[in-house]
Amino acid sequence: MGRIRRGGYMFMWWIGDHPPRHVHVYDKNGRLVTRVNLETLQPMDIPNVERKILELIRELQEEGRL
């Protein structure tokens, strides 16, 4: 399992988790906000997510952390 705290969110993932490759996003209170497909950057649980979440995921991918 990996996790990174950034921008008021916790991003968590599990190696060997079911496809598609995705990250779980939790708010500062530990509640699941959504899961995001890392290949398409599409939310898996709700139709839209805050742009900030997607920007943070892109940053983490560029840094090689996701």
Image: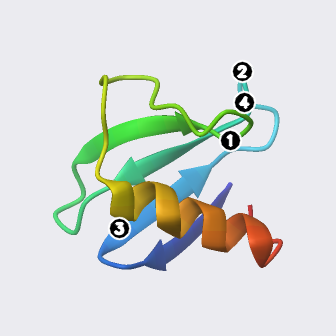
| Image quadrant in which you'd find residue 29 | bottom left
Name the mark nearer the viewer: 3 or 4: 3
Residue receiving disc 3: 9
At horizontal 63% and vertical 73% (from top left) the residue drawn is 59
Residue receiving disc 4: 17
The amino acid type of the residue labelled 1 equals Leu
How packed mark 2 is, by other alpha carbons closer than 10 Å (few <14, some 14-19, many 20 or more), is few
> Which one is earlier in the sequence, the residue at label 1 or at label 3?
3
Q: Is residue 41 left or right of residue 5?
A: right
Residue receiving disc 1: 38
Residue receiving disc 2: 18
How packed mark 3 is, by other alpha carbons closer than 10 Å (few <14, some 14-19, many 20 or more), is many
At horizontal 22% and vertical 69% (from top left) the residue drawn is 28
> Which one is earlier in the sequence, the residue at label 2 or at label 3?
3
CA–CA distance between discs 2 and 1? 13 Å
| Image quadrant in which you'd find residue 4 | bottom right
Q: Helix, strand, or loop for circle 3?
A: strand
At horizontal 36% and vertical 79% (from top left) the residue drawn is 7
How packed mark 1 is, by other alpha carbons closer than 10 Å (few <14, some 14-19, many 20 or more), is some
Residue closest to the eye, 32 or 52: 52
Q: Helix, strand, or loop for circle 2?
A: loop
Q: Is residue 23 left or right of residue 25?
A: right
Residue closest to the eye, 19 or 17: 19
The amino acid type of the residue labelled 2 equals His
